[in-house]
Every structure is written in structure tokens, then in C-alpha cells.
Amino acid sequence: MDYVVEVDQVTVRYQELVALEEVTLKVVHSEFVALIGPNGSGKTTLIKAILGVVRPTAGTVRLFGKPVPDLDGEWKRVGYVPQVAQIDHRFPLRVFDVVLMGRYGRVGLIRRPGKHDREAARRALDRVGMSDLAQRPIGRLSGGQRQRVLVARALAAEPDLLLLDEPTTGVDVGTTEGLFDLLEGLHREGITILVVSHDIGIVAQHVDQLVCINRRLVAHGRPEEVLSGEVLECMYGPHASLVGHGDIPHIVVPHHRSREG
């Protein structure tokens, strides 16, 4: 198999806290995979381990067949959309300037972007449907538009692997569906996508595989195979359920008042 991501028996500790425990995961070339799980389950830690930002306490991570510490120039093949963008929206950056930042991994911080880099940034904006807003200040965009710009910034690197950490946080259902329609189109173009999301009902309609994390790997498979009562109970507790809401199912976890309160 042509594996793009290989996580082998990875454990991550933050001092005494075990964030991930013996997680094994493989993502095949051109696959669209979503990581789901409750808050604090280790999803973001797993993404950081894949990116080499967090060093596993035990186990190994490989990208494109190479151990992460040895990746070197291969990092230019990875695009990343962080959970919280490190952009001050009050700063007078244009949309095009933000997207052009995605080329820095290829041209370096010293060289100035050239004609090819600017063309790549324009193509990326076109792919996310934001070309007409290229000259608009980033602070004058809606939340959904900003997320598309950040996806475009990652695409400007012309990646083979796209990692996204909760890209729909703070946006409405319509915007979330639109973003996942966009990601599905990129997937059809052959980009391997690994996305962290809490929008289980929406992602289940788009992805090839669901990976359920709750410190350990709980389940990994097709959405229709994974979203069983046993898996939901293991991740969210015995009272969790998947209920229909229009065309999109949602996880419901009742809040129970404690006897002391």
C-alpha cells in the first residue's frame, strides 16, 4: 500500500498526563480521513505529532515513508490549516498576501516570491472560490471566508498531504457544509486529506474513513461501520446518541446535574 501517513504505536505524555496511548494509524494516498473524538481526547496532539511539533514519548511517525525527524525537504509536500490562525485580523494584510505566505516553505524566508509563486497563490485562491476578494483586507472577511483563505494558504504550497485542525470552529452549519464540499473536491483531485472535526454528521457524508480517538484508537473504518452505539459510548459516554436533524445527524450528549449541585 502507498501510505502517506504511518503512526505506529505512538504514545505522547505531557509530564504525568497521557495525551495519546499506543495509537496506530495508516492513511493511504488520496484518502480523505476525519479524526473525531471528545474534547481533550488527543486529536490535536496526534496532528502535532504528525507535523513533528510534538515528539512522541514512544512509537514512530512516518510521512511519505520517511520518519518525521528525517523529512527535511519533504515538508514542502505538507499543507497545514491550524485550529486557531496566527493572524492578527487588525493587521492590514490583503487576502493575497496571506495566501502567498503558503509559498514560504518552498522559497524560504529570505528569497522574495517570484512569478511562479504568485501564480500558485492565484490558483489556490481560485480553487477555494476567493479570487474576487484577493485585494480585500483579511480583517474584512467573514469567518467562513477567512477559513477558505487559510485553506488557500495551505494549497499554495501545492501539497500532497493536507492537514486541518478543526477548520470549521466558530462557523455556521451552512459554511461548514460548504467547506467540506470544497475539501471533497480537493480529495477528488488526488490530495490526501486528514481533518480534525467535531461536526460528525457532516464529515460522515464526505470522508472515506473515520478515525475515532479517545486517548487510544477506538475505531477506524467507513463511517457507516464506525458510528455504532458501542463506539459512541466509548468516546462520549453511555448516554451519547446519534440523532437525525434534517439530512444531517448529530451527536447528542445529555448534561446531567450532579447531586451536589
Image (tube, rainbow, N blue to C red):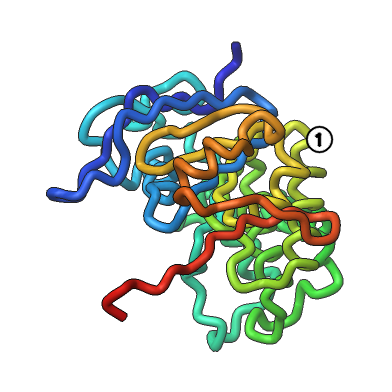
Q: Is residue 119 visible?
A: no
Residue sticking out furthest to the left: 16
For the point 74% across and 48% down, which residue is it? 183
Residue sticking out furthest to the front: 259
For the point 63% across and 63% down, which residue is it? 168
Q: Is residue 244 left or right of residue 36?
A: right
Against 46, is 88 above or below?
below
Of the pair 113 and 38, the residue shown nearer to us: 38
Give the structural element (helix, strand or loop) at label 1: helix
What is the x, y in percent for residue 198? 58, 56
Q: Is residue 190 left or right of residue 6?
A: right
**What's under tag 1, amino acid-wise?**
Arg
Of the pair 49 and 19, the residue shown nearer to us: 19
What is the x, y in percent for residue 176? 73, 62
Against 38, is 254 above or below?
below
Against 4, is 253 above or below?
below
Q: Is residue 247 left or right of residue 257?
A: right
The crowding category of the residue bearing disc 1, from other C-alpha atoms within 10 Å (few below 14, some 14 to 19, many at least 20), is few
What is the x, y in percent for residue 189? 80, 35
Against 30, is 98 above or below?
below
Q: Name the quarter where the N terminus is drawn.
A: top right
Q: Name the quarter where the C terminus is drawn.
A: bottom left
For the point 34% across and 72% down, which residue is it? 258
Image quadrant assignment for residue 190: top right
Of the pair 46 and 255, the residue shown nearer to us: 255
Q: Is residue 197 visible?
A: yes
How many numbered badges does the structure rendering display?
1
Q: Which residue is mark 1?
A: 188
For the point 75% across and 58% down, which residue is it? 179
